[in-house]
Image (cartoon, rainbow, N blue to C red):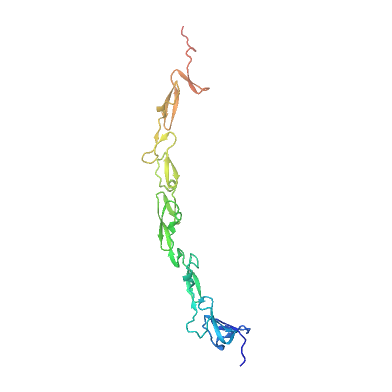
């Protein structure tokens, strides 16, 4: 009987491939010498025998006879051997002879081979300042904003109480907005909180005697005036009250 040349048979889903043949040979036209998960090859030293080698993705003896009852090619569980083979955002799913990386989904991450919820609130800046972060399964939400802030697209932003009408300032005071709050500013010459309850009170500048000698202080609303006393006249050059010259215009003998 004429011996065939040594050849290599590669198992696939539909064909065996023979090295000295240009095109694949249908599976049904060759005897199946190994399992589908193994390579079948002729041993040049033993032309009439066959040996098997496990394919990529399977493990077993390095080379074994198809007649061996104990030798088998077993699927390698790539996911078990390396749980992080797919990274932190995907989950490894073992398949026969290979594996697939399937995304954990938004809000989850791979933790030792298990898709677990991400606690977004561990990032203290995710909701911005002046907010409370609440972690949910697969997501999070920014809840109750501090006083002076409002929720805008999931983040707490400053409320301008002066433009929204929430500020309660006295009619004579000016509303000044600041981050998270506001204050009422009384006009110059007035003091107080400036709110609608306390309002603004006039400062009596005359209590501190701001006028110079020869003049008296007159308090006005929000200000004061200095006027010259009797016997004094205002000198525009010095802008002070100057004592009148009694010798001028005196007709007494």
* Rendered position, 114 above or below 56: above
The residue nearer to you, when weighing 33 against 197, is 33
* Residue projecting furthest to the front: 45
Residue 166 % position (x, y): 40, 47
Give the side of residue 248 with respect to residue 148, left or right: right
The image quadrant that residue 31 belongs to is bottom right
Residue 93 % position (x, y): 47, 72
The image quadrant that residue 218 belongs to is top left
Q: Residue at x 48, y 70 (%)?
A: 81
Q: Residue at x 51, y 76 (%)?
A: 58
The residue nearer to you, when weighing 215 against 41, is 41
Residue 167 % position (x, y): 41, 45
Quadrant showing the N terminus: bottom right
* Rendered position, 66 above or below 221: below
* Residue projecting furthest to the top: 253
* Rendered position, 98 above or below 242: below
């Amino acid at each position: 009987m004429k011996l065939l040349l040594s050849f290599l048979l590669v198992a696939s889903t539909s064909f065996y491939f023979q090295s000295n043949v240009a095109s694949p040979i249908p599976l049904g036209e060759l005897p199946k010498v190994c399992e589908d998960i193994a390579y079948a090859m002729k041993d040049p030293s033993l032309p009439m025998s066959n040996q098997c080698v496990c394919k990529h993705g399977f493990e077993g003896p390095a080379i074994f006879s198809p007649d061996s009852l104990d030798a088998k090619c077993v699927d390698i569980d790539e996911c078990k051997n390396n749980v992080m083979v797919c990274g932190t955002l995907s989950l490894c799913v073992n398949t026969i002879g290979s594996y697939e990386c399937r995304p954990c989904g938004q809000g989850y991450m791979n933790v030792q081979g298990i898709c677990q919820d991400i606690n977004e609130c561990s990032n203290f800046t995710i909701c911005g300042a002046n907010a409370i972060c609440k972690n949910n399964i697969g997501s999070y939400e920014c809840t109750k904003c501090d006083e002076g802030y409002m929720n805008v697209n999931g983040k707490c932003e400053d409320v301008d109480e002066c433009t929204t009408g929430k500020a309660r300032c006295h009619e004579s005071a000016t509303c000044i907005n600041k981050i998270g709050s506001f204050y009422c500013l009384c006009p110059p010459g007035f003091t107080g909180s400036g709110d609608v309850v306390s309002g603004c009170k006039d400062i009596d500048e005359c209590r501190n005697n701001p006028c110079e000698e020869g003049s008296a202080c007159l308090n006005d609303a929000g200000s004061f005036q200095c006027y010259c006393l009797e016997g004094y006249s205002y000198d525009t050059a010095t802008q002070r009250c100057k004592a009148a010259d009694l010798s001028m215009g005196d007709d007494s003998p």
